[in-house]
Amino acid sequence: MRTLTRALALAAVPALLAAPGAARACKVAENYRVPTNLELAAEANAIVLGQVVGAAEAVRAPGEARSSAIEVRPLATLKGLTPGGALLLPGMMLAPAAAGSGGGAVDFAEPHPEARAGGCIRRSFAAGATVLFFLRRADGAWLPAGGPLSRWAEDVAGPEAAAEDPWVQLATLYVHAAQLAPAEREALLEDQLEALQARIDAEPADDPATVALATDIERTMAAPGFPLIAMRPPDPVPPTEAVDLGQLGAEIDALGGKTGD
């Protein structure tokens, strides 16, 4: 199968989501660059912490057949606006609990293992899992943000511990950084990296989460064009009912707001 250019790969994601699971490996153009997690956070119209409720059906477009979907109960919003009720994600399916990536994952660079399959993104989720979703709005539906091989949906710790989950902390930092001017963005990430490296040096015990946070910030700052953010323009988001960030937001926003005094 001919490899896709970046533009074609992004345009083909909805069709790939509707296709049945394929055994072939994901293939993209040789010059395709997976977005950094900062670019992913900047591009997403909404970043939602949600709990997978179960399987559902969704109409992709008028006159088209129903497709598989999952129903997600929003718990908190790190960015943007989301429906106040259930969130339906088309093209997704339920999977056994063992198929989830597990909460507190500390490898932020590699795509989810399922993304290496034909669809190039993760598509299956265990019922009851708490997941951090990066979403874009298109054709009246919420779809994965970021394109092929992006970390658009990752299992995190349950609601009670989500504020301390490394992936939630990293996403919150990048949401804050993406809103800043380039020079301020660079200064913020440099301060965060310095603080993380000091923590690593001060703690004799191995701390994989802190190491992973520092490593991803270093990778982000080494990306082409940084501190600018290379991304495609986001899709417009129609007004919808917001889900309050609440106490969770107050706790996890502290990381993004620190400047390394």
Image (cartoon, grey):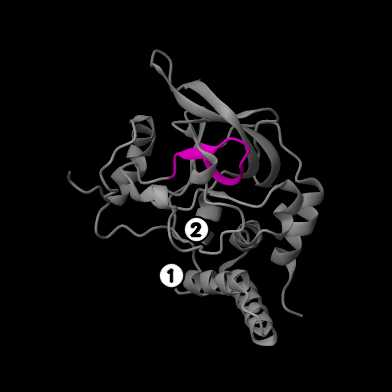
Label 1 sits on a secondary structure element that is: loop
Give x and y (percent) for residue 159.
72, 47
| Kind of residue at badge 2 | Glu
Among the two numbered marks 1 and 2 on one chain, the one whose residue lies closer to the N terminus: 2
Closer-to-camera residue (149/208): 208
Residue displayed at 35% across by 51% down: 116
Q: Residue at image x 44%, y 55%?
A: 231
Q: Label 2: which residue?
A: 39
Residue 148 in sight? no
Q: Name the residue: 34% across, 41% down.
A: 119
Say if the magenta span includes residue 155: no
Please say whether residue 126 is one of the residues in the magenta stretch.
Answer: yes
Q: Position of residue 35 (x, y in %)?
A: 43, 58
Q: Which mark is residue 223?
A: 1
Quarter of the image for the C terminus: give it: bottom right
Q: Do the numbered discs 1 and 2 sit on residues whose CB atoms are within 8 Å?
A: yes
The quarter of the image holding the N terminus is: top left
Query: What secondary structure is the stretch in magenta mostly built from?
Result: strand
